[in-house]
Image: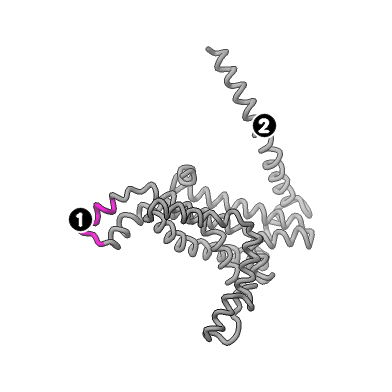
Amino acid sequence: MLSQASSVNRVYWLIVAPAIVMLVLFYFVPLGQVLLTSVTDPKPGLGNYALLFTSAAIHKTLLTTVRIAAITTGLALVLGYAVAYAMRAATSQRQRLMLFCVLLPFWISVLVRSFAWLTILGPQGPINAGLMGLGLVDEPIALSRNETGVLIAMVHVMLPYAILTLYANMRGIDVGLVSAARSLGASRFQAFRMVFLPLTRPGLIGAASLVFILSLGFYVTPAILGGGKVMMVAQYTAFQINETMRWGLGTMLAAALMIAVLGTLWALSRVIDVKRLFSA
């Protein structure tokens, strides 16, 4: 019996070992190199991390990143909740159609979508052309190459993540509870607010966390729609490494972003079961 158990263990480790080796070589080793560079370039110490508290440019970049990520998260939650709720209430045939429409953007490159929004929101784009044709404005509105364009495009990219997370949560809710509330005299709005909405709180927290974390590291969309006027952490990091060759500062920002994400997940784990939330 012991021999059989040891054989099973050997087979298990033979299967798992290649994955562990790849994880160490392609993830932990580069990550360790980033952390090492952040405290050794241009000289050993925590001088790069001190800039988080003393550099006005970094403060502005961090505030811009957090603000855009927070607004994107809020808008994605509101729009995503409405779409997910409509999907939950639709017939099975319409659910499949709506789910296909939600998944369709995943098959299109973020780069392509960003350039598409640049065209749509541009001075000669269909939105400005429509507004001017209706006589609502006399000249094109600045919808691109600024924070407005970045927010519109980022919400579009993040919306499927919010919808899918919320929809997965809503599918697990027994609609009979809402019907029971209605039978006891609650109005449609009261049943939604007092029964359905509280049951979707885990989905809201999960969607908010996922969208916010992904938004913190956005690079392509702000770079294209921001027109160089909207600087987020990922852009600032790339600029420091590729243009100024300040590897220590760039890796410090990357490490700080990673720590912020891990810290967010840790704080979230103090409140809810993160593993169960995202596995749903």
Disc 1 crowd, CA 10 A, few/some/many (<14, 14-19, 20+):
few
Residue at left 57%, top 87%?
Answer: 138
Residue under label 2: 18
Dot 2: element: helix
Q: Which residues are magenta?
A: 177-187
152 horizontally vs 169: left or right: right
Q: Amino acid at mark 1?
A: Leu
Residue 80 vs residue 233, the one in the foreground: 80
Residue under label 1: 184
Residue 244 vs residue 23, the one in the foreground: 23
Asked if disc 2 and disc 1 are in contact, CB closer than 8 Å, the reply is no
Q: CA distance from mark 2 to mark 1?
A: 59 Å
Dot 1: element: loop
Residue at left 66%, top 60%?
Answer: 111
195 horizontally vs 83: left or right: left
Q: Position of residue 261 (x, y in %)?
A: 57, 52
Residue 99's label in the rendered image is: none
Q: Position of residue 39 (x, y in %)?
A: 72, 50
Image position of 51 with respect to 264: above or below: below
Q: Amino acid at mark 2?
A: Pro
Classified by dominant secondary structure, the portion drawn in magenta counts as helix
